Amino acid sequence: MLPMDTIQYLLPQNRIPLAWYNILPDLPKPLAPTLHPGTLQPIGPDDLAPLFPMSLIMQEVSTERDIEIPGEVRQIYAQWRPSPLVRARRLEKALDTPAHIYYKYEGVSPAGSHKLNTAVAQAYYNKKDGTKHLSTETGAGQWGSSLAMACAFFGLDCKVYMVRVSYDQKPYRRALMEAFGASVTASPSNQTESGRAILAEHPNSTGSLGIAISEAVEMAAKDPNTKYALGSVLNHVLLHQTVIGLETIEQMAMAGDEPDVIIACAGGGSNFAGLTMPYLGRKLKGQSHARLVAVEPAACPSLTKGRFTYDFGDTGHLTPLVKMHTLGSTFIPPGIHAGGLRYHGMAPLVSHVMDLGLAEATTVQQLDAFAAGIQFARSEGIMPAPEANHAIAHAIREALDAKEEGKHRTILFNLSGHGHFDMQSYIDYQAGKLQNYDYPAEEIAMALAGLPTVA
């Protein structure tokens, strides 16, 4: 018999979900419409056709609760899904807490993170609709790696605009993308009008996801054989990630436990939504009591300091306007090592759920996040990605609160990816080169001053 501190809750391959869960029909209030950037009127499916295949556009606006996962997608999922749910008993012991701590480990995917759940789906639908090339952006490189791999599987060309600061910080992520056949360019670049405009004003720009999105969108909009793929934010992307929560519900039942608090880091919102939306669906039906907590970096606090309003998804104002928590599309956060969390906005679905009071948000400083990641690694033997460290840090907070209160608490968090390609960030942390950032209120105010006017 295995010792009690090595328990994993594993599902067989035939328990990969048959359908993604769409929470939209179960919400008490519908999402605000997406607006055309020129007319400021609600857009229709045809307005999105230059960027996305119609199959994904229809998922974006679907009100069906269960959307079937194609067999070919499930076959690829079977390379790593169902992913394990693990009871973090060693961490519990290190914290001397009465809390039960569980983590859903998405780092077992071939690309090393949860991003592959939607990359495979998006590549499949694009291939089916006749797309030849995909363009995208990436921050830390987890999404770029995932889309590059998915494109290799389906025979698509992949162009990735990688945020400059991450391009420099994470050369091995770049190498992985290129090994899968992708072309990777540091953003902002001289390859696009939007990139050249940024460089003309800020020659040494470290870039942002908003800028990289502009470049990738521009490339797709100008070429009828190219479509754009996004790794977070949009409804269909969050939909594909619900395999995480659907599996976890079944695995928690295997463990004979039920979460009191569910935690995930939040940059654009995909891994948070992937774990929590199936639970929120149960909560709306009275079948769960769990608190849902999104954890963001203090350096890029869109949920905790941003405004819930209409904004562009990119810096160049090429995308439609969506209602979301935003720091302003011109906001460029400092070069923290959690590159996947450096986005000025938050998924409209996650923002809407927050606005309805159905979830909560908090922040973690960079040094606290890395300290938590080191503690987790020494307890559980997994080196987490810098993004996932934010979720770990708050899980530790919750466990210590339970200890102080002398009460039981079951904590569940999403370990969204491993940090094997992020070791330079740990080297910098151990050498004392990293620092905390509290983004100045006046800088946020300046970015928010440029929000579009929507009646």
Image (cartoon, rainbow, N blue to C red):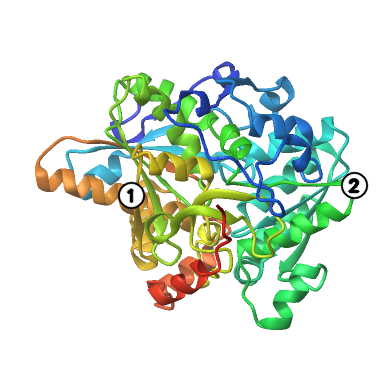
Q: Position of residue 294 (x, y in %)?
A: 39, 47
Name the secondary structure under disc 1: helix
Residue occupying image coordinates x 60% and y 18%? 18
Residue occupying image coordinates x 75% and y 42%? 48
From the image, state whether disc 1 or disc 2 is nearer to you: 2
Q: Is residue 329 left or right of residue 284?
A: right
Name the secondary structure under disc 2: loop
Q: Which residue is mark 2?
A: 224
Q: Which residue appears farthest toward the front when viewing the image?
A: 455
- Residue 19 is labelled as none
Three-letter amino acid code of the residue under disc 2: Pro
- Depth check, front residue: 230 or 139: 230
Earlier sequence position, callout 1 versus callout 2:
2
Q: How many marks?
A: 2
Q: Which residue is mark 1?
A: 379
Residue occupying image coordinates x 72% and y 37%? 44
Three-letter amino acid code of the residue under disc 1: Ser
Q: Position of residue 344 (x, y in %)?
A: 53, 61
Look at the picture and state if 254 lies above or below 180.
above
Tell me which corner region of the image, top left, top right, bottom left or bottom right, holds residue 169: bottom right
User: Does residue 170 appear anywhere in the picture?
Assistant: yes
